[in-house]
Image: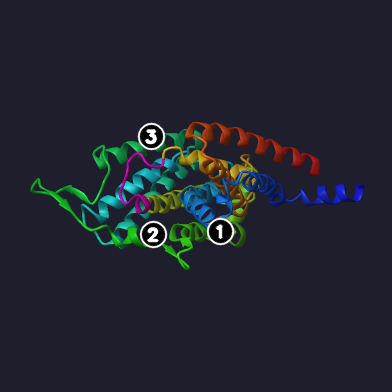
């Protein structure tokens, strides 16, 4: 028995092992309350992966920011702004899909870099800076959209309503591949996660991100370019928010200035559920993927069992707190 406890303690020293415990618990709940076998149908898992993909893309960028001991509350509003912009560029303005995508990606990266610069140089609090950007981006999205959804039916220069075909970009993203089994947006999510993993694990800037999050002043004295590192983290987070906004517009086939509300909280929840520390310096995208699956399966299980939206929100909040407390307890025992 002592040997088993020792082995369990050694296993729980690893962050991935601690992050897997809540996921396994959620999967067990899904298996027990399977809604007449619906949980065991591949369609339910495919649907879950599609549903978490947009927020999962945001969570990848949020991981980079949180590793630096920061936070980005603006990503949900940037999703709305970028969804509106890509819809405007590709439908009413009639720009080529590639031009519209590049413009939106540049917009997201610029918004993120602006937040990063304000955090890095005047040393403003990330919470305040990104809260201001959240409000600004949401207001800009509503102004550009005229307070309504941007669709393929719009009023032309002569005042008459015009209907244009849906952009090929939207059709390409909102489809399934690999024998109609995997959504393209899920593959985009996995691609973004892989890119962020490369940044954190295989590039010098990744070491800088961890150093800044671990101890800002010590990193500066060690020669780490702390300011440019912070700008990079927030710019990449904004870029991924733009990717998420494009995917959201493609799935909804329009640009809604109200879309993305609350997404930043779900993204933070995925990162924290995975075990990445809000204090900075510890964590990774692999852990965020585990957190995304945990939150996704939790919401899917509640949905399959016909819980109301209100009940799902309350239960999700309670279970999130319980999961984080459980992880912390396991970490203390392992220590």
Q: Which image quarter is the C terminus in?
A: top right
- Mark 2 secondary-structure assignment: helix
- Cα gap from disc 2 to disc 3, whole angstroms: 28 Å
* Image x and y of residue 250, in percent: 35, 54
Q: Residue furthest front?
A: 36
- Cα gap from disc 3 to disc 1, whole angstroms: 29 Å
Q: Earlier in the sequence, mark 2 or mark 1?
A: 2
Residue occupying the point 39% across, 50% down: 248
Residue occupying the point 44% across, 57% down: 185
- Quarter of the image for residue 106 reads bottom left
Name the residue carrying label 3: 135
Name the residue carrying label 1: 199
Q: Earlier in the sequence, mark 2 or mark 3?
A: 3
**Is residue 151 found inside the magenta-colored segment of the image?**
no
179 horizontally vs 219: left or right: left
- Quarter of the image for residue 68 reads top right
Above or below — where is 266 with respect to 179?
above
* Image x and y of residue 32, in percent: 65, 45
Give the magenta-colored segment's residue range. Answer: 249-260
- Quarter of the image for residue 333 reads top right
- Cα gap from disc 2 to disc 1, whole angstroms: 25 Å
- Mark 3 secondary-structure assignment: helix
Mark 2 or 1: in front is: 2
Q: Earlier in the sequence, mark 3 or mark 1?
A: 3
Q: Is residue 220 visible?
A: no
* Residue neighbourhood size for the residue with mark 1, other residues' Cα within 10 Å, grouped as few (<14), some (14–19), many (≥20): some
* Residue neighbourhood size for the residue with mark 2, other residues' Cα within 10 Å, grouped as few (<14), some (14–19), many (≥20): many
In the depicted view, which residue is nearer to us: 103 or 289?
289
* Image x and y of residue 301, in percent: 57, 44
Tag of residue 278: none
Name the residue carrying label 2: 173
């Amino acid at each position: 028995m002592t040997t088993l406890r020792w082995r369990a303690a050694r296993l729980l020293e690893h962050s991935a092992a601690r992050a897997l415990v809540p996921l396994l618990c959620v999967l067990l709940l899904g298996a027990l309350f399977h809604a007449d076998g619906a949980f065991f149908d591949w369609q339910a898992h495919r649907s879950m992966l599609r549903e978490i993909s947009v927020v999962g893309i945001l969570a990848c960028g949020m991981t980079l920011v949180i590793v630096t001991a920061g936070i980005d509350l603006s990503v949900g509003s940037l999703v709305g702004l970028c969804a509106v912009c890509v819809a405007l560029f590709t439908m009413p303005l009639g720009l080529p899909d590639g031009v519209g995508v590049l413009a939106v990606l540049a917009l997201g990266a610029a918004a993120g870099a602006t937040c990063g610069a304000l955090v890095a140089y005047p040393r403003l609090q990330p919470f305040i800076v990104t809260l201001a950007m959240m409000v600004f981006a949401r207001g800009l999205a509503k102004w550009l959209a005229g307070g309504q959804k941007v669709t393929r039916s719009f009023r032309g220069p002569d005042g008459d309503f015009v209907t244009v075909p849906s952009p090929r970009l939207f059709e390409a993203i909102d489809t399934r591949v690999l024998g109609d089994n995997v959504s393209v947006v899920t593959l985009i999510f996995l691609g973004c996660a892989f890119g962020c993993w490369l940044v954190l694990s295989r590039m010098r800037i990744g070491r800088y991100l961890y150093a800044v999050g671990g101890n800002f002043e010590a990193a500066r004295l060690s020669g780490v370019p702390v300011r440019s590192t912070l700008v990079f983290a927030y710019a990449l987070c904004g870029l991924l928010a733009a990717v998420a906004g494009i995917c959201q517009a493609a799935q909804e086939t329009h640009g809604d200035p109200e879309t993305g509300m609350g997404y930043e909280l779900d993204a933070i929840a995925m990162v924290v559920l995975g075990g990445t520390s809000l204090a900075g310096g510890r964590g990774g995208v692999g852990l965020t993927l585990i957190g995304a699956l945990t939150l996704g399966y939790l919401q899917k299980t509640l949905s399959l069992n016909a819980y109301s939206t209100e009940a799902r929100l309350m239960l999700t909040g309670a279970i999130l707190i319980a999961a984080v407390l459980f992880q912390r307890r396991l970490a203390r025992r392992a220590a």
